[in-house]
Image (cartoon, rainbow, N blue to C red):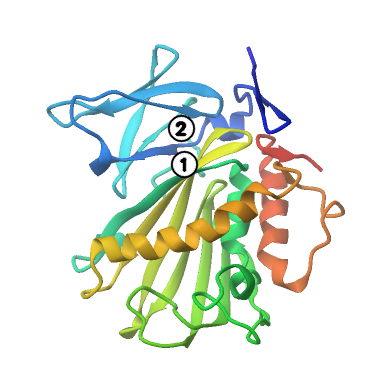
Amino acid sequence: MASVVHSANVTVTDQRCTDPVVLNLWHPIAAVLELEPGGEHRSRLLGAHLTYGITSVGDLWASADGQELPVIERYGYLWTSLGSPEGGDSLGIPFEIPEAHEPDRRNMNAGSFQVATSAPRAIENFLDMGHFPYVHTDLLGVEPHTEVADYQVDIHDGEIWATDCLFFQPVAAASATGGQISEYTYRVPHPFCVMLYKNVPTDPSRRDVIAIFVQAMTEETVRVHNFYSMVDETTSDNGLRRFQQVIFSQDKPILENQRPTKLPLDPRVETPIRADQSAIVYRRWLTELGLTYAVIPA
């Protein structure tokens, strides 16, 4: 049964997902440290109504419409699935983030934000360096440094990797003391999860990891969980969160004003430019996976 929501003269049908590609994935639903032991929390996932929490003895649990769901904890988040995430599902969690296991890393949820957009739109926005000078002015970019240099995008072992991504940033991280050319590597290991690796301002031999794990509440509403794995001995947890919250507050209105809300997979619908190399590969990858949820198929 679909529920119809009317808001700001827009009608959205929240149909429960039937796409097996998406149903059989693990999906993030909450940062574990933000769950009150013994409490009960409610949310949505793929159109289903979720109830979840952590017991007084530390056991995670989740259910949808009264049905018990599988749960795991990875990188500080509770993940669940409405399908069968085990057994040959190469897109499932856990995808590995080796850096997160290094003892001097600070792993944290830098904020979870609800956004009126689709999960693939959120992923594409994260991949887009071209908007840095215009949306994140004086932070991640600044005019006249607007050119996106050529970079490489390939698919390795079922994941998208964009390498040699160089961009001038006036404030590359909360710990930065000045502008720098930042080198990014983007990785998409899951249709609704994306991360970037960027050189640490205080130690260029290492990489910070910044990721978004997107919870598709419905086809056109998401919660974006911002994951940090940082090499930063000076900035407080609140300082790291504030920096990310400023960045995301600038992205949110852009995402919510994109039309159509679902991501078109037909390359002829939205004209790509050179800066969209990652987006082109991402859309082709979703098409090859056979994903139909939260997208407009080609």
Instruction: Using the rendered view, name the quadrant where residue 129 is placed.
Output: bottom right
Query: Please, is residue 171 above or below residue 23 in the view?
Result: below
The image position of residue 116, as x and y in percent, is 59, 41
Query: Please, is residue 241 above or below residue 71 in the view?
Result: below
Q: Residue at x 56, y 25 (%)?
A: 47
Along the horizontal axis of the image, is 11 left or right of 223?
Answer: right
Query: Please, is residue 4 above or below residue 259 in the view?
Result: above
Q: How many numbered marks, from 0 up?
A: 2
Q: Residues within 10 Å of mark 2 (few under 14, many from 20)?
A: many
Q: Secondary structure at mark 2?
A: loop
Per the image, the residue denoted by label 2 is 85
Query: Toward the viewer: 6 or 88?
Result: 6
Disc ID at residue 92: 1
Residue most toward the left?
Answer: 57
Residue most toward the right?
Answer: 268
Q: Is residue 113 visible?
A: yes
Q: Which part of the image, by quadrant, shows the N terminus?
A: top right
The image position of residue 179, as x and y in percent, is 46, 87
Instruction: Using the rendered view, name the quadrant where residue 126 is placed.
Output: bottom right
Q: Secondary structure at mark 1?
A: loop
- Which callout, 1 or 2, points at the residue further toward the start of the chain? 2
* Mark 1 and mark 2 residues within 8 Å of each other at the beta carbon: yes
The image position of residue 139, as x and y in percent, is 49, 75
- Amino acid type at image mark 2: Pro
The image position of residue 142, as x and y in percent, is 58, 81
